[in-house]
Image (cartoon, rainbow, N blue to C red):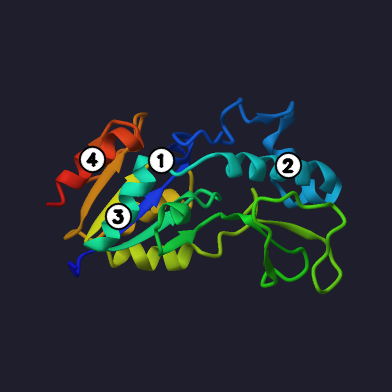
Amino acid sequence: MSCEHIVVISGAGISAESGLSTFRDSNGLWENHSIYEVATPEAFARDPELVHRFYNARRRQLAEVEPNTAHLALAQLEQRFRVSIITQNVDNLHERAGSTEVLHLHGELTKARSSRDYRLIYDVGHRDLAVDEVCELGTPLRPHVVWFGESVPMIEPAMQLVASADHVLVIGTSLQVYPAAGLVDLVQETARLTVIDPGAVRSVQGAKVIQKTACEGIGEWMAGLI
């Protein structure tokens, strides 16, 4: 196995190719509700039933899809390299494809946590979460996701990974959302940086851009590793 370290920063585009809808699919609306009505601490305090309904629907959808060729290709790279994946996605498709080192910047859909103590985290899988379910402290469980207006506690470990990389691949994200978009500024001058995304990508100095979808572009990028 090569000692080279590949760090992958993945976004919604890679999951969309498996059939997962993203927050921006319907103009930021879900069942005529603004995403801010289902993805903020204030929304959960105001209407926990609505918030749970939204995330229960996301879990049910996640159970129906499979990792795609891009997820599988990244997992297979572990046979030759150390591969660290930093994902902005809350799904578990990287893990289901076989990737073993996955850092979730924005939390995990298949987990819930205490609304009082963020360290109390519980696996819920793909099942629905009831509004009256509580943690061991007796306070309501909430989705284990980072909502709008909340800090991103995993950003510092992500920064350390990017700074240590020999290769950085940005896939399925246009690098528009911070703080995740700022990670590319930490890529070392000696590292190779590639961006795979079919849309308009923020200009990053020194980056090779493959303007294709994740599944279309992953083979071209992997060929360049040889």
Lower position in the chain sequence, tag 3 or tag 2: 2
Q: In whole angstroms, how far apart are the C-alphas of marks 3 and 4? A: 12 Å
How packed is label 4: few (under 14 Cα within 10 Å), some, or many (20 or more)? few
Q: Mark on residue 76?
A: 3
The answer to whether any part of residue 170 appears in the image is yes
**In the rendered structure, which amino acid carries the disc numbered 4?**
Gly
Q: Nearer the viewer, residue 17 or 8?
A: 17
Measuring from the top left, give residue 5's x and y in whole percent: 25, 64
How packed is label 1: few (under 14 Cα within 10 Å), some, or many (20 or more)? some
Residue at left offset 56%, top offset 54%: 106
Quarter of the figure with residue 214? top left
Quarter of the figure with residue 213? top left
Q: In whole angstroms, how far apart are the C-alphas of marks 2 and 4? A: 37 Å
Proximity of marks 3 and 2: CB atoms separated by less than 8 Å? no
Proximity of marks 1 and 4: CB atoms separated by less than 8 Å? no
Lower position in the chain sequence, tag 2 or tag 4: 2
Q: In whole angstroms, how far apart are the C-alphas of marks 2 and 1? A: 28 Å
Above-or-below relation of 125 to 101: above
Above-or-below relation of 41 to 31: below
Measuring from the top left, give residue 211's x and y in whole percent: 28, 31
The answer to whether any part of residue 207 appears in the image is no
Above-or-below relation of 54 to 42: above
